Amino acid sequence: RIYYLSLEFYMGRTLQNTMVNLGLQNACDEAIYQLGLDLEELEEIEEDAGLGNGGLGRLAACFLDSMATLGLAAYGYGIRYEFGIFNQKIVNGWQVEEADDWLRYGNPWEKARPEYMLPVHFYGRVEHTPDGVKWLDTQVVLAMPYDTPVPGYKNNTVNTMRLWSAKAPNDFKLQDFNVGDYIEAVLDRNLAENISRVLYPNDNFFEGKELRLKQEYFVVAATLQDIIRRFKSSKFGCRDPVRTCFETFPDKVAIQLNDTHPALSIPELMRILVDVEKVDWDKAWEITKKTCAYTNHTVLPEALERWPVSMFEKLLPRHLEIIYAINQRHLDHVAALFPGDVDRLRRMSVIEEGDCKRINMAHLCVIGSHAVNGVARIHSEIVKQSVFKDFYELEPEKFQNKTNGITPRRWLLLCNPGLADTIVEKIGEEFLTDLSQLKKLLPLVNDEAFIRDVAKVKQENKLKFSAFLEKEYKVKINPSSMFDVHVKRIHEYKRQLLNCLHVITLYNRIKRDPAKAFVPRTVMIGGKAAPGYHMAKLIIKLVTSIGDVVNHDPVVGDRLKVIFLENYRVSLAEKVIPAADLSQQISTAGTEASGTGNMKFMLNGALTIGTMDGANVEMAEEAGAENLFIFGLRVEDVEALDRKGYNAREYYDRLPELKQAVDQISSGFFSPKEPDCFKDVVNMLMHHDRFKVFADYEAYVQCQAQVDQLYRNPKGWTKKVIRNIACSGKFSSDRTITEYAREIWGVEPSDLQIPPPNIPRD
């Protein structure tokens, strides 16, 4: 069995996905229509399950879909947050957060399983006794499982996502002899139940809060008990009434760690094997390593989890001892191979010395796993050459690449039925479970009728999205303009600011020469900023402020519009992506581990403007670089510029259009009521921009001019679109999961349809 452990599952809505995967959509559509109802209207009522921040959480959701579709015995395990990612409101151009009370009206897709409730222990003390180690005087929180079905695509397989909810035991705070205040004690149950209250809203940023560490241990401890219970009760190849030998554990169980968030699985499995099951240390360590595998999702240093030892000491004292023991053995091994190399020992230790001793969770994961993977080829190389260089030198065979993918069921069939139908007409339906078959569209790249059909579907999607924007947000846009879309979490490394500078440049060019013919654009930028991320929130304010100026300038007319897409989430992605013409993927080379939005746009008939970063590199390789708009510094160039020293002023002084744009932001041209509103943005760009926005400005603006030029030639544009769609097959999560299954988990996917429940089994 495969266990995919993640603190995030960004599932979105479930109704339409369930109908699609069960092959019931047309039947339901018809039945609902006959009742005088509109299915689409019904679908809009469902809340998103927003139990994730962005890429990492959505990847987990796509993986669940693919694992079920490939017939794997796989379980997703996570936390049933009472409040998911906040709802974003824009007030006076600023982001305001609102609690996401997604369970307010109940959740029809989940089933509580109180019969499988499990205890999770915190705090306490450790006693070393003659008959083993005891973890005593702990506080207990109960983990209540809620199961959500995960249907495969038309194969009658239904897997399970099990999410844990925290519950106080009935004697909570009443165990203490003669509790004075019974009422107070019952009210204090909230303290235990807060563990599953809310998702931490940080994307690519580590915030060392105790509640977050509790969440991480909570999901791990509950899940591992479940895994071991299932292993012991399984009679397969075992004559004992209850399985007590753990020799076969790694053959029966694979645990995949989605980033370091569930890293405590490693010491927790050791604790169970050594302290509870009395397996000797070396055997337990061998079992643990063969069972666990770790996926790295980022190389940004501020995102790496480094927990203070003092917090562990208090919350998980036994796990701290186990981590020390793991580290000691690891360092002894390194010291034997590299005698006298003390700096290497310091670099490779799980414990970071310093003013505050910390536990490096990534190092723990690398040491405690049999496989470590990055999520795109370029990222996996960076992982080996820089982040985990020392570890790669020690065990090169451990390091792999598994380029991310997306499920074509949700991200084509469900969100873009028009395009899906157009493709089905030409090559049949098989591509939905074997996306590489889209290659069959390549011969049609010059087929006039097909070109027309693809362009027509895009235009219909744009009209539909325009109507949605007008209805929901009262903004009127020109549906024949180029839809230039930049949607993802707001972060400096994703460089929404580079997009802003381009928009300002376009605006200035229109103002300078209003009579000239410009390609009309609607620039849409969307995404949430972490509530504590000051710069990200300022970036949103800048986008809305630029919009206020540009959208109300009569000289500009409908040649340029800037829209901030409020509350970007899975269900909004399903609407905007099929309508996009241009997809912006413009992170500084070497910072975006993979990206998956890039793949969704490619599959849905948008062209990409992007840097050679993450999976963009492989998209360019699949489709041909000439079919993407690639610009800017490569990883090597960024490194060279770092060695030389990046000087923003050099670009500012040399490029008049850049200077004008920066001066306008700085002078209050876009914030007349508060002239120094954006001084922090300008100061960052000029003096401490880690992501080198100015260094790519010139190439970006030139590349955007090439985009305009091609857009003037609709047939040439659509041909490139068709080539992109035809070459997007590699980016199915079915391919990704097949690679994980064969190369990490040691299982073989199956495309067999199991018999439906109404047909009796042999």
Image (tube, helix red, strand yellow):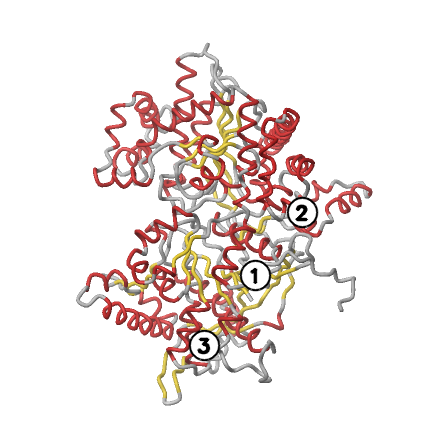
Could you tell me residue 248's position as x and y percent? 50, 75
Q: Is residue 340 above or below residue 382?
A: below
- Near mark 2 (Cα within 10 A), the count class, few <14, some 14-19 or many ≥20, is some
Residue nearest the viewer, comparing 589 with 399: 399
Could you tell me residue 139's position as x and y percent? 45, 74
The residue singled out by tag 2 in the image is 16
Residue nearest the viewer, comparing 400 with 312: 400
Report the disc number at residue 272: 3
The residue singled out by tag 1 in the image is 748
Residue 91 visible from this viewpoint: no
For residue 306, side relative to residue 749 (left or right) = left
The amino acid at mark 3 is Ile
Could you tell me residue 449's position as x and y percent? 66, 26
The amino acid at mark 1 is Glu
Residue 240 visible from this viewpoint: yes
Could you tell me residue 629's position as x and y percent? 44, 30
Cα gap from disc 3 to disc 1, whole angstroms: 29 Å
Q: Residue at x 69, y 57 (%)?
A: 753
Q: Residue at x 64, y 51 (%)?
A: 14
Q: Are marks 3 and 1 in contact (CB under 8 Å)?
A: no
